[in-house]
Image (spheres, grey):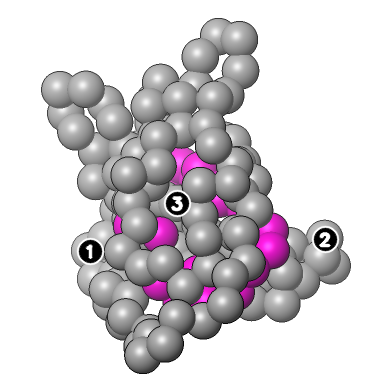
Amino acid sequence: MITVLFTDTGVTYNNRALVQYDYNQVLQIQGIEISGTPQIHFARKGMEAIVKIPSVDTETGYITASVPNSILQYDGEMTVYLYSINASTGKTLQSITFLINPRQKPEGYTLQPDEPLTLSEKFIAENTPGDSIEDRITALEDAVTKLTLTGLGAL
């Protein structure tokens, strides 16, 4: 498990904790409260961002999400965005940059599939700004486009 700790003096984490071709890595975020519904966006230049709905421990407030296996296929920089969705707005609260350490592909390595993510209409209605389902879908598409452009270095 890779721990990211937010305190009054800053953020502490091992920015080199990830290694190319690893799989089933877990990111745990401590010391930050996200109002509304939290999301974690994993972005790399040249790739579409992957959005995860993390689990939040009600006792500790720790936010936990699995790092997408597909993003660990590549070495280089990865940015993790902590995102909050409230009834009328969505915004990035913090970003964390990791350097995925390169290594040679292990013999016999096969890509482990990422867990699928399906957003229900109810989830979209409760967690995406907009009055109609069309507005909400547009807001989600805009967010994915912005993350993709950020990952490509265009923004």
Height in image: 122 above or below 89?
A: below
Compare marks 3 and 1 and give the one earlier in the sequence.
Answer: 3
Looking at the rendered structure, the kind of residue marked 2 is Leu
Task: List x then y, in percent, for residue 11.
Answer: 57, 24
Q: Which residue is mark 1?
A: 122
Magenta-highlighted residues: 66-89
Does the rendering let one see residue 147? no
Residue beneath the point at 52% across and 60% down:
19
Looking at the rendered structure, the kind of residue marked 3 is Ile
User: Secondary structure under badge 2?
Assistant: loop
Task: List x then y, in percent, for residue 7.
Answer: 51, 14
Graded by Cα atoms within 10 Å as few (under 14), some (14 to 19) or many (20 or more), the crowding at tag 1 reads: few
Q: CA distance from mark 1 to mark 2?
A: 31 Å
Q: Picture quarter containing residue 113? A: bottom left
Is-magenta flag for residue 50? no
Compare marks 2 and 3 and give the one earlier in the sequence.
Answer: 3
Identify the mark at residue 155; answer none if there is no mark.
2
Task: List x then y, in percent, for residue 50.
Answer: 49, 68
Q: Which residue is mark 3?
A: 40
Is-magenta flag for residue 72? yes
Discs 1, 2 touching: Cβ within 8 Å: no
Q: Is 6 positioned to the left or the right of 45 in the image?
A: left
Of marks 1 and 2, the one in the foreground: 2
- Out of 113 and 83, give the one closest to the viewer: 113
Residue beneath the point at 61% across and 18% down:
10
